[in-house]
Amino acid sequence: MKKCNLTILLLIVCYNLITAQHKGNYNQITREISRQNILSSGNATIYNPAVQQHINKVLQPSNVLTIDVKALQNVSASTYTAMFNLSQIGPTAEATNTLMKERIDNIKKRLVLLGITEKDIAIDVISFIPVYEVEVTKKLFSKTYTEVPKGFELQQNIHIQFTKTNQFESILEACAKSEVYNLVKVDYYIENIQEVYKNLQDELLKLIEDKKAYYSVLGFDLSEYDVKIADDKYCYFPKDFYQSYQAYNSVSFEALKKDKGVTSAKKQTSYYYQPLTYERYDIVIDPSILEPVVQIGMNIKLVFTPKPKEQKPQPITKTEVDHKYYVISPNGTIDVKELNTKN
């Protein structure tokens, strides 16, 4: 009976583990989903409020026409620059500088074997300062604490430029052999960014013409509209889109063996690359990506409002005017006579 209960318990635990594995380690969005919602809302629940709002959106007709188009292009970097930080201490300034130079020369020799030349390597001196230590001097009734120079610390950054991502692993290995582990960052560079913007602009102009033709088929004459425009362009690099998450906690099998309570294992914080998604874009050039890329975008918005109708001048109609003339007699009396103008 005990074996049967233990078997059932193991099956339940294994099922939970398999389910967690199927869900994956990423647990930032799914943890916000309520099981109560799953049980009460049917089999086709939409968890994203923005999607639900868009489905239930009610269109409001208007005589103001808007053409809002967005384009995005994924561009692989032409060159990359990795920056490593080196720190070296020594008893004297000369010894510290010599030790640092030996480490950097060893890195350069290994990089040359990878096809990275001297011109692709640059050294940036950050600081060169003395290091002090507190010296305690004991006296009869007191102690004296004095800072005395103990050595020197030299910090430098080494910039390494390369053109292929598969070189980066070898670069890390070359630096690690000289005890350089502090990778500061990796910068991405692309050539002829203006050509990319020009390509996006051409694609957006084609799309705008298609939308104008669409409105024309619907019976709108855009020559009778005033137009306003707004445009924008931007460029994002991979470093802007790394996000963090923590994996699911897993149970401990040691607890089952020792017949104790279940304990959870602490998971480290992981990072992943999350580029711009495409649902808001009308045009996406090179949408399928395998590695982090530079994302370049452009937006153009046109608003067409009906021209105000011209006010036609009202025609002036002739009205009958009574014409009168005055007759003054020699004695000064004035006699008013009507002038007949109908004939």
Image: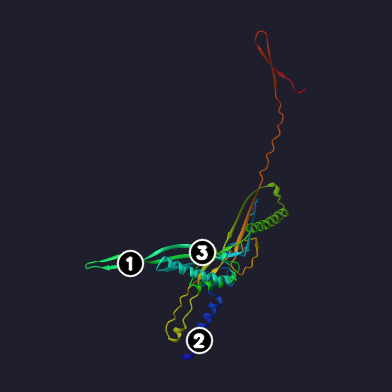
| Marks 1 and 2, the one that precedes in the sequence | 2
Q: Tag 1's secondary structure?
A: strand
Q: Nearer the viewer, residue 147 or 317?
A: 147
Q: Looking at the picture, how far across and down is residue 170, in whole percent?
A: 56, 73
Residue at the farthest left position = 141
> Which label's residue is closer to the chain start, 1 or 3?
3
The residue drawn where x is 29% and y is 68% is 136
Residue under circle 3? 123
Q: Position of residue 309 (x, y in %)?
A: 67, 43
Residue 316 quadrant? top right
Given the image, on which type of amino acid does mark 2 rest?
A: Ile
> Three-letter amino acid code at disc 3?
Ile
Q: Residue furthest top?
A: 331
**On the image, numbered disc 1 is attached to which residue?**
134
Label 2 belongs to which residue?
8
Q: Which mark is residue 331?
A: none
Furthest toward the front, the residue is 94
Is residue 234 visible in the rendered image? The answer is: yes
Does residue 271 appear anywhere in the picture?
Answer: no
Nearest to the observer: residue 184 or residue 335: 184
Mark 3 surroundings within 10 Å by alpha-carbon count, few (fewer than 14), some (14 through 19), many (20 or more)? few
| Nearer mark to the viewer, of 1 and 2 | 1
Position in image of residue 331 (x %, y %): 66, 8
Alpha carbon separation for disc pair 1 and 3? 33 Å
Q: Secondary structure at mark 3?
A: strand
